[in-house]
């Protein structure tokens, strides 16, 4: 139970400190509202939920990597840059995939 609260704290701290996390959650809320408005199918909900989880999880892992890098290498170091840029790249890949899939799901309902 204690570890559950620590995990929740990790999610909450990322939300508080990371602007990108707030943007991801705002987009997630908008997608959920659109999902109800357009009555998307059960399969489409499953895809959306997987993408929400993927984007938010990778953003939290990105925050964890940033914290570790800042802890062990507060000064500029090429390896610190490799670690931070790689973590940011992972978030970018899932965010682009989520945006494309989101458009593929919702555009046909709008047109
Ligand atoms: N110690 C460091 N050594 C080398 N490069 C670094 C270091 N810290 C940050 N950088 C570079 O600056 C970029 C931004 O790092 P920063 O820690 O500010 O992340 P951020 O812009 O706050 O990311 P996010 O918006 O996801 O929080 C990194 O992607 C990396 O290229």
Image (cartoon, rainbow, N blue to C red):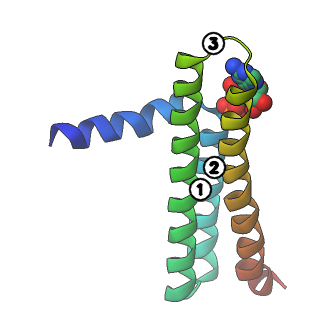
Seen in the picture, residue 10 relative to 86 is either above or below; the reply is: above
State the count of labels.
Answer: 3
Residue 111 position, x and y percent, is 85, 85
Q: Position of residue 2 (x, y in %)?
A: 17, 37
Q: CA distance from mark 1 to mark 2?
A: 7 Å
Q: Looking at the image, is mark 3 or mark 2 nearer the viewer?
A: 3
| Residue where numbered disc 3 is placed | 74
Mark 1 burial class by Cα count in 10 Å: few <14, some 14-19, many 20+: many
Where is mark 2, residue-wise? 24
Q: Judge the density around disc 3: few (<14), some (14-19), many (≥20) Cα neighbours within 10 Å.
A: few
Query: Which of pointers 1 and 2 lies earlier in the amino acid sequence?
Result: 2
Q: Mark 1 = which residue?
A: 55
Choose mark 1 or mark 2, whichever is in front: 1
Tag 1 and tag 2, C-beta contact below 8 Å: yes
Front residue of 21/106: it is: 21
Q: Is residue 53 above or below residue 67?
A: below
């Amino acid at each position: 139970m204690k570890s559950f609260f620590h995990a929740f704290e990790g999610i909450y701290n990322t939300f508080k400190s990371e602007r990108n996390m707030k943007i991801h959650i705002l987009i997630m809320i908008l997608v959920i509202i659109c999902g109800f408005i357009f009555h998307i199918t059960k399969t489409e909900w499953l895809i959306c939920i997987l993408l929400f989880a993927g984007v938010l999880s990778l953003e939290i892992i990105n925050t964890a990597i940033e914290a570790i890098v800042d802890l062990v290498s507060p000064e500029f170091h090429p390896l610190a840059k490799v670690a931070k840029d790689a973590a940011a790249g992972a978030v970018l890949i899932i965010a682009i995939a989520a945006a494309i899939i989101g458009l593929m799901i919702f555009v046909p309902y709008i047109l």
